[in-house]
Each structure stands twice: as structure tokens, then as C-alpha cells.
Amino acid sequence: MANYSEVKSEKGKRQVVHDNFIYHSDGQGSLSSYWRCEKRGLCKGRGVIDMATNIFTQTKPHSHAVEAEKIERKRTVDHLKEAVKEDTIRPLQST
């Protein structure tokens, strides 16, 4: 079972969330995918996902605090966007 979750960036790209840190894709190998902290330039946090086990391992530590509130906002926005795509949210009817 995976020890990470996924969210979408503002541009709709896949991001990985692990231990309340957000990662962007940083390359793909045949057996692993590589991830870097979204605060590129400020933080050297990195990780790798083993494709065989689907397990995320942090390979370099972060230099900033966790971002639990930002992650929750991203998940809410992702949920709302999916609901709109599925047309499950109806506009308010004026009377």
C-alpha cells in the first residue's frame, strides 16, 4: 500500500504528498520515479517512489516547516474541480 497521496498543481500536474510535504516530479527511471520539494531553490528536500512496492522514501530532508493547511486547500480544490467535471454541483436557482 502506498505511503503517500497525490494532489494536482495549479496547472493540473501530478504532485505527491508525503509527511505533509509537497513534491513535484523530477524524472522517471525504469524502476523508480524521482521527486523534489515544490519549494525549489529554497529547499533541497527530495524523495523517490519505488515502482515495484509503490513506497515513497525521502532521500534528502526539508529545510522548512510542513504545509498541512496548503495541502488541505489543494485537496479541496481538486475535489471541487472533479465535482464540476462530473457536473455534480448544481448552480443555485434564483426564485
Image (spheres, helix red, strand yellow):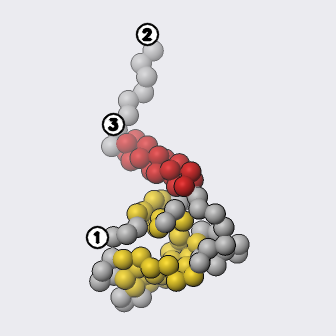
For label 2, the crowd category at 10 Å Cα-Cα, with few meaning under 14, some 14 to 19 and many 20 or more, is few
Task: Name the quadrant containing residue 40.
Answer: bottom right
Question: Of residues 82 and 61, which is closer to you in this image?
Answer: 61
What residue is drawn where x is 36% and y is 89%? 30
What residue is disc 3 on?
Answer: 88
For label 3, the crowd category at 10 Å Cα-Cα, with few meaning under 14, some 14 to 19 and many 20 or more, is few
What residue is drawn where x is 59% and y is 62%? 66
- Of labels 1 and 3, earlier in sequence is 1
| Labelled disc at residue 95 | 2
Residue 13 left/right relative to 40? left
Question: Of residues 13 and 15, which is closer to you in this image?
Answer: 15
Report the mark closest to the observer, 1 or 3.
1
Q: Position of residue 10 (x, y in %)?
A: 55, 56
- Of labels 1 and 2, earlier in sequence is 1
Q: Element type at marker 3?
A: loop
What residue is disc 1 on?
Answer: 1
Question: Of residues 39 and 61, which is closer to you in this image?
Answer: 61
Farthest top residue?
95
Q: Position of residue 67 (x, y in %)?
A: 58, 58
Real-space CA distance between mark 3 and mark 2, rounded to the nearest whole angstrom: 21 Å
